[in-house]
Image (cartoon, rainbow, N blue to C red):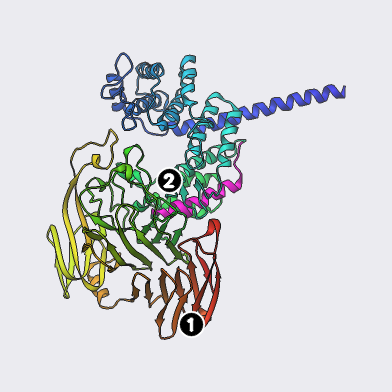
Amino acid sequence: MQQRTSFWSIILFLFASAAAQAQDISTIKKRVVDDLLAPSVNKEEIDQLIKTIQPDGTWPGIDYKDVSRTGFQHKQHLDNMLELARAYKKKGAASFTAPPVKAAFSLALDYWLAHDFRCDNWWWNEMGTPNLMINTLLVMDDALTEKQKKEGLAIAHRANMETFGARPGGDLMPIAGMFAKQGLFMENADTLRKALKAMAADIKISNERGLQPDMSFHHRTDNVISTLTYGSNYASSFAYWAAKIRGAGFSFPDSSIRLVTDYFLDGICQSLVYATYPDPGAMNRDISRKNALDAEDVSLPRNLRQASDYRAKELETIIAIREGKTKPVITKDRYFWHSHYYTHQRPDYYASVRMHSARANNMEEPHNEEGIKNHYYGDGSFFLSRTGREFSNIFPVWDWRKVPGATIVQKADFPHWKQLAKKGLTDFAGGVSDGKYGVAAFDFASVHDPLRARKSWFFFDNEIVCLGAGIQIDTAVDIATTLNQCLLKGEVVVNKQSKNTTLQSGKHTLPNVSWVYHDSIAYFFPQPTTVQISNGEATGNWRQINHQAWATEETVKKNVFTLWLDHGIQPKNATYAWIALPNVDAVTASKYSKKSPIRILANTPELQAVEYTGLQRTGIVFYKAGSIKVSDKLTVATTQPCIVMIKAKGATVSAMAIAISDPTQKLSFLQLKVNERTIQVSLPTDGKAGSTIIEQ
């Protein structure tokens, strides 16, 4: 009798567990479908889709024959299907007559299923098409025929955990998300569980593909930053599912949620202007796409907030900033030593520097013929922003040999885009930061031309000091360093010989300039300098930077401000020095020029150093062993190349804080001497090599 009771108890337990699991699947599925139905439905667009669909299920205007990597307009067909599905299923869309919507949808779906279009680009076959297909299946669900379900699911299932694209470094996570949706559609807990397990396993620190120890992200093994592209998809996909499964019988490890939250706040947000607008300096071939710098929405931080209480206040602040409910008050510096990328956040401006070295390629490959003029984009680029909109859709009219911050050969022709990405040539590229201030420095060697330069940037609260030395090339070509190239907004004021002049539109060569002012940013020159300025209309087209089918030769016109220094033909040991002062007006610029707290202590190929007297901070770049006399009471020397920032209270050595890093990432030890005090510095190695350490 007791054995019979135990048997039925087990049966009842299993039945209850199965019922609970089915309810959990139903709950998660409803959350996902509700998200898919959330976008508004435009009646005029739906009516037009119904009106224009052909008897065979096609729409005019879509090239169904071109399945090349640069074509594949078939996405529009899939988008149309999903819009019709929303119109048919969305509550409150009663104004649509259901039969015509359903009929148009079925025609379109059956046409796709009959032809099963494949693109030459694997991404569409394993990600793009399966994603749109499973979303459509989930929305229509019980309105589908068994044949449509079976054949549609077969296409959706090309996104699976064994496919080529499901590899660490960004694509695995969204593919796992598509696989999870298949589990929901089939109401198969094992499939859902397998997908979630794969996601959790991919949340880890890696020195290869994926999330790096410095909270940047690498999609490939070329060590090129991809934080805002593949890295954003990585975090977004995980956060989406973390929110959707919470409290519904499935869960991720708390450690995984915490790590993704850290990555979002310390990596992604630090690569965004005001945690909202993508920094152009962190972009790759995607910069050649329309609207690439549009503001990020609240979905990622909101999903992380729903998934956990970890760092809740910071997430809520980001959400409020993106919703326009609060102003950003971010003050934070971070050098990403795995990605050659320095970021400087302030409440009223943002700046970044991007470099490369022998440890990485200069730029992402121009896959699918996008970003085909990015040859010099990572050559010490320096982007400065006050609003996050200064570079919005400027790139079809850009002069791609005048990348802000970069020193570039000036000639008309570019190397072929297939030769764009190359391994860097020098070891010295790095940065140091105490979390609030810092220095970035670059022993620059062009991968395309025999051009060399030593470049450094010193970041303070209200100023950024930019130095260049040892600029030289062996061939008879012109060399220029660009200070900025952005959308023209308002007047351009130039100060020379203590007189302010507002420039007319045009191109200008101006000698003896003390400072230039444009769009709330002043550019100061410690010594009167000859500058080049262009302020006026520029023309171009998207086709010259992107060969995708949408990118046409239609003329684009923008008003552009460009400020650069011409080093002349075949310079030998040329230099530059300038100071950026953001968030000022012309009156403030005039006052600042008369009393600057900046002291440039050295600007040579061996040593670059800047002191900010008010902050009692000195940044020093030692390209080789050497010493520098900061003041009568302070001398600093080193036995190895390094970057140093010293905070000194008076001249008392014991009251100093020293931030130091090894930009070559090859050293394990160096000796630093501050006055008579010798400091034996053990440097980080492995995944921490190149990071900042603080010595008291």
In terms of depth relative to the viewer, which is nearer, 510 or 416?
A: 416
Residue in the image at 51% along x and 33% along y: 31
Q: Is residue 693 magenta?
A: no
Task: Give the image quarter of residue 386.
Answer: bottom left
Task: Give the image quarter of residue 383.
Answer: bottom left
Distance between the alpha carbons at the discs numbered 1 and 2: 51 Å
Q: Is residue 158 left or right of residue 393?
A: right
Give the residue type at disc 1.
Asn
Q: Is residue 355 left or right of residue 153?
A: left
Under circle 2, the secondary element is: loop
**Residue 298 tag number:** 2
* Residue annotated with mark 1: 675
Asked whether the viewer can see residue 332, the reply is no
Relative to 178, residue 146 above or below: above
Relative to 348, residue 76 above or below: above
Residue in the image at 52% along x and 64% along y: 667
Instruction: Write down the region rendered in magenta.
Output: 250-272
